[in-house]
């Protein structure tokens, strides 16, 4: 069974490294475009500060928005480094 991990591919199969990294870049772009951008545009709570929590499947505000420290920390981290932990930039 082949690993989907780019580092494992690099170490074991040099021919597939380019394809593996291409798939990883496509996944990062899809995450940015379809999750991070729509969420960031809607989740900042201008009235009470922090981040709104509850959304429906059309990215519309829904629910009581019970905020917590863990959610705020995770949202901050997600928007601070959308490229992933391995990127320096």
Image: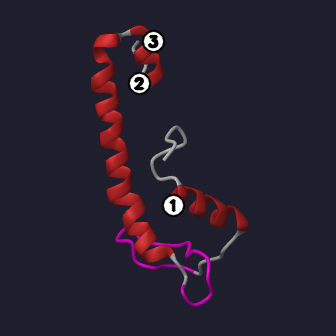
Residue holding disc 1: 79
Mark 2 Cα shell of 10 Å, populated few (<14), some (14-19), many (≥20): few
Q: Residue at 30% x, 41% y: name it.
A: 26
Mark 3 Cα shell of 10 Å, populated few (<14), some (14-19), many (≥20): few
Sequence-earlier tag: 3 or 2: 2
Quarter-of-image position of residue 72: bottom right
Q: CA distance from mark 3 to mark 2?
A: 12 Å
Q: Residue at 38% x, 64% y: name it.
A: 37
- What's the colour scheme? secondary structure
Q: CA distance from mark 3 to mark 1?
A: 31 Å
Sequence-earlier tag: 1 or 2: 2
Sequence-earlier tag: 3 or 1: 3
Residue holding disc 2: 4
Give coordinates of residue 31: x percent, y percent: 38, 51
Q: Which residues are magenta?
A: 46-63
Specify whether 26 is left or right of 36.
left
**Observer-nearest of 75 and 84:** 84
Name the disc covering residue 11, or none: 3
Farthest residue in the bottom direction? 47
Quarter-of-image position of residue 6: top left
Q: Residue at 33% x, 20% y: name it.
A: 17
């Amino acid at each position: 069974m082949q690993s989907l991990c780019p580092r494992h591919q690099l170490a074991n199969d040099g021919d597939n490294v380019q394809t593996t990294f291409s798939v990883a870049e496509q996944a990062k772009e899809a995450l940015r475009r379809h999750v991070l951008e729509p969420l960031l545009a809607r989740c900042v709570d201008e009235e009470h500060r922090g981040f709104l929590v509850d959304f429906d499947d059309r990215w519309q505000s829904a629910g009581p928005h019970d905020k917590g420290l863990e959610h705020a920390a995770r949202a901050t981290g997600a928007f601070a480094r959308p490229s992933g932990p391995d990127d320096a930039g």
